């Protein structure tokens, strides 16, 4: 075996033997991958209320053009029992969104553009707020809670979409949630702060417009994913990409040796 091939073999072997365990994408609805017109209903999710429209880039949630208040949300297929366990194994909920209109920050406005899930003990929910609190311009938030909004991430410029990653860490029988904005850790919330009574979307996720109350809002959902890892840096599933990268490195080495 030539030295170059040996080098390539060693590279591949080192990747195979020493890569961290691959992250597993447990659930994924990606609007762009699904294609225009395809909704989560076509991929085994359950829809409640008004459908969203897949533009080919995102799912458009928009009930603002119809008088009265609508709701419309999608509940994912149920994952393996215990996937979400309080104090249990890591998991991550990742989604890319852009609100088009503001949450009015009154009463039951909380689920007008929200994402929710439950573990074996509690329900959790976050909402996407274009303008923080009662503001009517400026930056906005990712908030949690009901009737009052507690911000997990603030100062978000929603003129463009952003990716939110909520990482679950078990901690001695209870849980903490790390909130990431576009891959950067912003805050950590204990389950005592974010947990609510309820079991809707247990071992599953649900997103969209969850109430017929108050005003309606519009927004864009690009993807919604669940991982078996709790931080976005680890959320890279493709072993193949590592091999390709290594093979490319090997080719470069081969070319250099030939010079
Ligand atoms: Ca609504
Ligand atoms: Ca607001």
Image (tube, grey):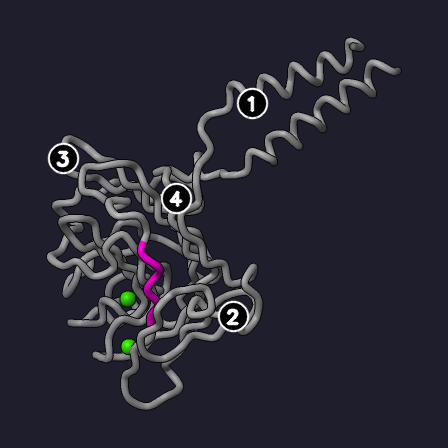
Residue 109 spot, x, y in % from top left: 22, 71
Range drawn in magenta: 73-78
Circle 3 is placed at which residue position? Answer: 173
Within the image, what quadrant is residue 63 found in? Answer: bottom left
Q: Is residue 19 left or right of residue 10?
A: left
Question: How far apart are the alpha carbons under marks 2 and 4?
Answer: 22 Å
Residue 76 located within the stretch drawn in magenta: yes
Answer yes or no: do the residues labelled 4 and 1 have beta carbons within 8 Å?
no
Question: How far apart are the alpha carbons under marks 3 and 4?
Answer: 21 Å
Q: Is residue 66 above or below residue 38?
A: below
Q: Is residue 112 left or right of residue 162?
A: left
Residue 42 located within the stretch drawn in magenta: no
Which badge, 3 or 1, comes first in the chain's sequence? 1
Residue appearing at x 83%, y 13% in the figure: 257
Crowd around label 1: few <14 · some 14–19 · many ≥20 (10 Å):
few
Q: How many numbered discs, if any?
A: 4
Residue 227 spot, x, y in % from top left: 39, 44
Circle 4 is placed at which residue position? Answer: 227
Element at label 4: strand
Q: Quadrant of the C terminus?
A: top right
Q: Quadrant of the N terminus?
A: top right
Crowd around label 4: few <14 · some 14–19 · many ≥20 (10 Å):
many
């Amino acid at each position: 075996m030539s030295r170059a091939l040996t080098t390539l073999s060693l590279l591949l072997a080192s990747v195979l033997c020493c890569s961290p365990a691959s992250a597993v994408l447990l659930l994924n609805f990606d609007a762009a991958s699904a294609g225009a017109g395809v909704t989560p209903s076509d991929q085994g999710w359950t829809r409640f209320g008004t459908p969203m429209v897949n533009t080919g880039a995102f799912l458009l949630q928009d009930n603002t053009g119809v008088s009265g208040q609508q709701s419309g949300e999608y509940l994912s297929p149920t994952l393996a029992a215990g996937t979400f366990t309080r104090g249990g194994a890591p998991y991550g909920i990742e989604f890319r969104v852009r609100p088009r209109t503001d949450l009015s920050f009154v009463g039951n406005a909380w689920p007008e553009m929200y994402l929710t899930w439950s573990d074996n003990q509690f329900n959790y929910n976050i909402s996407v707020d274009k303008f923080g609190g009662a503001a009517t311009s400026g930056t906005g938030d990712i908030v949690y809670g009901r009737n009052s909004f507690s911000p997990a991430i603030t100062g978000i410029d929603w003129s463009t979409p952003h990716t939110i990653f909520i990482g679950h860490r078990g901690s001695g029988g209870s849980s903490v949630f790390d909130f990431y904005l576009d891959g950067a850790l912003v805050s950590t919330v204990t389950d005592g702060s974010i947990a609510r009574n309820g079991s809707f979307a247990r071992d599953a996720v649900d997103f969209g417009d969850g109430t017929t109350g108050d005003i309606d809002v519009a927004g864009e959902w690009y993807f919604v994913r669940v991982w078996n890892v709790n931080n976005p840096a680890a959320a890279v599933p493709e072993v193949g990409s590592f091999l390709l990268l290594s093979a490319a490195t090997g080719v470069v080495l081969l070319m250099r040796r030939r010079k």
